[in-house]
Amino acid sequence: MKKAFQVEGMMCQHCEQRVNKALQGMEGVRACSASAKDGIVNVEYDAQRINDAAIIQAITDTGYDVKG
């Protein structure tokens, strides 16, 4: 499954790296790409192994707000 999460607070490449690192370490996440410019984190994941709530929590734990 692929999904785009709208994220507020990312301002730079370091922010993108923090979010990507947090998500890439999660079981079930196949790929992710954060864009501070667009305020979007695209995630490809196995919905049988991880759900949206866990992904949102991981992003929130890095210090950013997920909208929508």
Image (cartoon, rainbow, N blue to C red):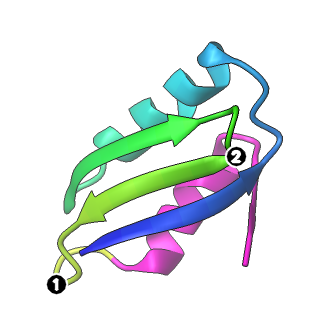
Could you say which is closer to the camera, residue 51 or residue 39? 39
Q: Amino acid at mark 1?
A: Gln
Q: Determine which of the numbered discs, if any, sits on residue 48 in the image.
A: 1
Q: Earlier in the sequence, mark 1 or mark 2?
A: 2
Residue 63 occupies which quadrant of the picture? Answer: top right
Residue drawn 27% across the image and 60% down it: 44
Q: Amino acid at mark 2?
A: Gly
22 relative to 16 in the view: left or right? left
- Determine whether 15 is above or below 20 in the image: above
- Determine whether 35 is above or below 31 in the image: above
Magenta stretch bounds? 51-68
How crowded pointer 1 is (Cα within 10 Å; few <14, some 14-19, many 20+) is rated as few
Task: Identify residue for label 2.
Answer: 39
Residue 23 is a magenta residue: no
Residue drawn 57% across the image and 64% down it: 5
Could you say which is closer to the camera, residue 20 or residue 37? 37
Residue 54 is a magenta residue: yes
Q: Secondary structure at mark 1?
A: loop
**Residue 18, horizontal then vertical, whole percent:** 55, 27
